[in-house]
Image: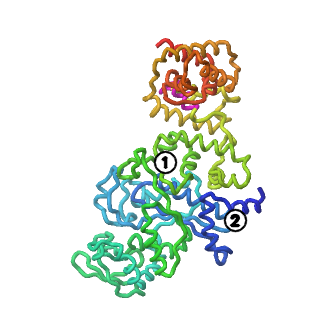
Amino acid sequence: MTDAELIAAAQVSKAWPFEEARKLIKRFPEGKPGGEAVVFETGYGPSGLPHIGTFQEVLRTTLVRRAYETLTGGAPSRLIAFSDDMDGLRKVPDNIENRAVLDANLGRPLTRIPDPFGTHESFAHHNNAMLRQFLDRFGFDYEFVSSSDLYNSGQFDDALRGVLRNWQAIMDIMLPTLRAERAATYSPVLPVSAKSGKVLQVPVAVVDAEAGIVRFEDEGKIIEQSIFGGQAKLQWKVDWAMRWVALGVDYEMCGKDLTDSVRESGKIARALGGRPPEGMIYELFLDENGEKISKSKGNGLTIDQWLTYGSEESLGFYIYREPKSAKSLHIGVIPKAVDEYWQFREKLASQPAEQQLGNPVWHLLRANGYAGGDGDKLPVTYGLLLNLVGVLGANATRDQVWSYLGNYIDDADPAAHPDVDTLVTTALAYNRDFIAPTLQRRKPEPNEALALAALDEELAATSDDATAEELQTMVYEIGKDPHFAFDGLRDWFKALYETLLGSPQGPRMGSFIALYGIANTRALIAEALAD
């Protein structure tokens, strides 16, 4: 594909990253004035560790950024990973062991609370370091920006002055959205107490907008204090709008739970003389029971959990798909995501341009260089690996699996097939934790036993060099034989899975037999018939 062909295909592509990127093209049809970079932003709240929601937002924003660069032939862009670390700590996370340190500092800005882990300057500095490590692990191209740094250094002072100048306009936007009790004490500015160091939720009056002076009550005394230089922060929706204007943010997406915030922050941004960014509101992930995932409930799935049982590419693939539709996020979705990623990757090279741009893998490969080691096709599916290790048992080892792969793959060497080796490791973990404890082979019914015996007889007369397709045909023919009285091939395969593998579903049996070996498969059949 030439650059011109790529741009032409991108201009009409219905892939969601291109649809989002075209919003920016409409905003800047000739590029941003002065050749400036288009600014993409993601936000992170460092009261807790980075999680799968953090990953999804940075990845999806990166996909839109790359789509914008494609449409414009490489126009400059930036991605800001913004940490809201000036926030006051409202609640101690459940997963912190040294809670006393945080309990003693509730209400203080996150960067002014000692690090309970004892490794960094503050609690926020620790979590920010985890964020950077997290993003670097996946190769994201980003600029880290700390809210506290901008407040404390005075870089936000002029934007804060704009908030004071437009105080009444902001109040007119916010007060109708609040309950009466909340409205009575609401202030766009939250001063930081010089006495307690806490971020105060108190009524505030503007004394001098240009000088940044406000008046409020603190511990029974009326205080006049500057809001500049880190002596105050803004309420969330006002803060978000101020940041958009101060940093010149052109694109930011968020979850459905922030729909109202987007609307109100957009109005505030306009009141400040700016323009709210383009963006997409995506649906939230649900757990296996269809409930919203909550960090406090612990009903979600962590990045580490996904990468224990699946690949990095499969995580990106799952997050790419249908961002505006709610999706379940639990352990059970991983195997399918792994195999579907490789199915789409195998198709990519042979697809015409317009189909390539609709292929999730095209976007993922361009995002952060998911290159993989085995080319565009895996010689064995993840589902097949899971069935193999299921038969080998909970104590199966990597070396055992690779010895069986020698029946199926030429040059069955982990060094030659690093992507397969990654999946061997994850399959062993998935089997150990989720499959092996549930497997239970049942005794075959009389007609099933006759069919299994016929399969064994056929396998005994079959060469070890038989291909997976030849073996699959053999299995088909037995299932279609009216003597065994199966109600369709589905019943026959279900019997094979339940009696030989201990599972209600399974792989193409020809592929499994080729992988596991004819002699080993005959041994499985003998065990089933002996029960």
- Identify the residue at image location x=50%, y=59%: 282
Question: Which residues fall within the magenta stretch?
Answer: 384-395
Residue 441 in the image, given as x and y percentages of width and height: 47, 22
- Identify the residue at image location x=58%, y=19%: 521
- Identify the residue at image location x=39%, y=52%: 295
Q: Is residue 310 above or below residue 104?
A: above
Q: Is residue 285 left or right of residue 386?
A: left
Neighbourhood count class around disc 1 (C-alpha, 10 Å): few under 14, some 14–19, many 20 upward:
some
Q: Is residue 498 above or below residue 354?
A: above
Q: Is residue 225 left or right of residue 245?
A: left
Residue 432 in the image, given as x and y percentages of width and height: 47, 31
Q: Is residue 242 left or right of residue 297?
A: right
Residue 393 in the image, given as x and y percentages of width and height: 49, 25
Q: Is residue 155 above or below residue 523?
A: below
Q: Which residue in the structure is indicated by mark 2?
A: 74
- Identify the residue at image location x=62%, y=54%: 368
